């Protein structure tokens, strides 16, 4: 019985380490968010000073297991649609940073974020 418990604990530790390493690897690679006006490339690396919960607002502790689109759909009739969610969070933050005199990301032209296809 004790051996089984130790084995289970080892498996859980290995699983946690694997999830943590996967999350770190994903942080180093930009993600591409598909959208009608053109895909948006997002770099977690350049946003590392911002807490994960600012964007991943449903995550309290632990790994982020779902994409934004799991809740924020592309359907503009949906109150939680992705366009409104991304624009309100991203653009608002970039404008606030710019107003405070700090370096910020794009906030004015669509083409600054949306890549041409």
Image (tube, rainbow, N blue to C red):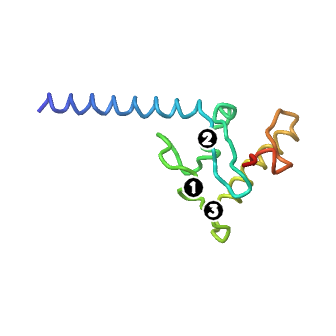
Q: Is 27 located above or below residue 35 in the figure?
A: above
The residue carrying mark 1 is 69
Q: Give the alpha-carbon distance from disc 2 to disc 3, as whole Å.
A: 17 Å
Task: Look at the numbered disc 1 and give the secondary structure of its residue.
Answer: helix
Q: Quadrant of the N terminus?
A: top left
- The answer to whether residue 4 is left or right of residue 39 is left
Q: Nearer the viewer, residue 46 or 7?
A: 46
Hey, which quadrant is residue 8 in on the image?
Answer: top left
Sequence-earlier tag: 1 or 3: 1
Q: Is 115 located above or below residue 103 in the figure?
A: below
Callout 2: few (<14), some (14-19), or many (20+) C-alpha neighbours within 10 Å? some
Q: Nearer the viewer, residue 5 or 76?
A: 76
In percent of the image, x 65 and y 58: which residue is there?
A: 82
Task: Look at the numbered disc 3 and give the secondary structure of its residue.
Answer: loop
- For the residues labelled 1 and 3, say whether their Cβ atoms are less than 8 Å apart: yes
The residue carrying mark 3 is 74
Q: Give the alpha-carbon distance from disc 1 to disc 3, as whole Å.
A: 8 Å
Q: How many marks?
A: 3
Q: Give the alpha-carbon distance from disc 1 to disc 2, as whole Å.
A: 13 Å
Viewer-side label of 1, 2 = 2
In percent of the image, x 63 and y 44: which residue is there?
A: 32
Q: Is 102 located above or below residue 68 in the figure?
A: above
Callout 3: few (<14), some (14-19), or many (20+) C-alpha neighbours within 10 Å? some
Mark carried by residue 21 = none
Hey, which quadrant is residue 105 in on the image?
Answer: top right
Residue 39 in percent (x, y) is at 68, 49
The residue carrying mark 2 is 31
Q: Nearer the viewer, residue 34 or 65?
A: 34
Residue 36 in percent (x, y) is at 70, 58
Task: Look at the numbered disc 2 and give the secondary structure of its residue.
Answer: strand
- The answer to whether residue 68 is left or right of residue 100 is left
Sequence-earlier tag: 1 or 2: 2
């Amino acid at each position: 019985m004790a051996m089984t418990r130790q084995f289970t604990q080892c498996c859980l530790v290995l699983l946690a380490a694997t999830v943590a390493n996967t999350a770190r690897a994903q942080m180093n690679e930009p993600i591409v968010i598909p959208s009608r006006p053109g895909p948006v490339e997002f770099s977690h690396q350049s946003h590392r000073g911002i807490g994960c919960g600012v964007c991943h607002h449903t995550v309290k502790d632990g790994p982020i297991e779902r994409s934004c689109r799991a809740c924020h759909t592309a359907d503009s009739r949906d109150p939680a649609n992705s366009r409104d969610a991304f624009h309100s969070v991203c653009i608002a933050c970039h404008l606030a940073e710019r107003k405070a005199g700090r370096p910020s990301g794009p906030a004015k032209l669509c083409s600054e974020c949306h890549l041409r296809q």
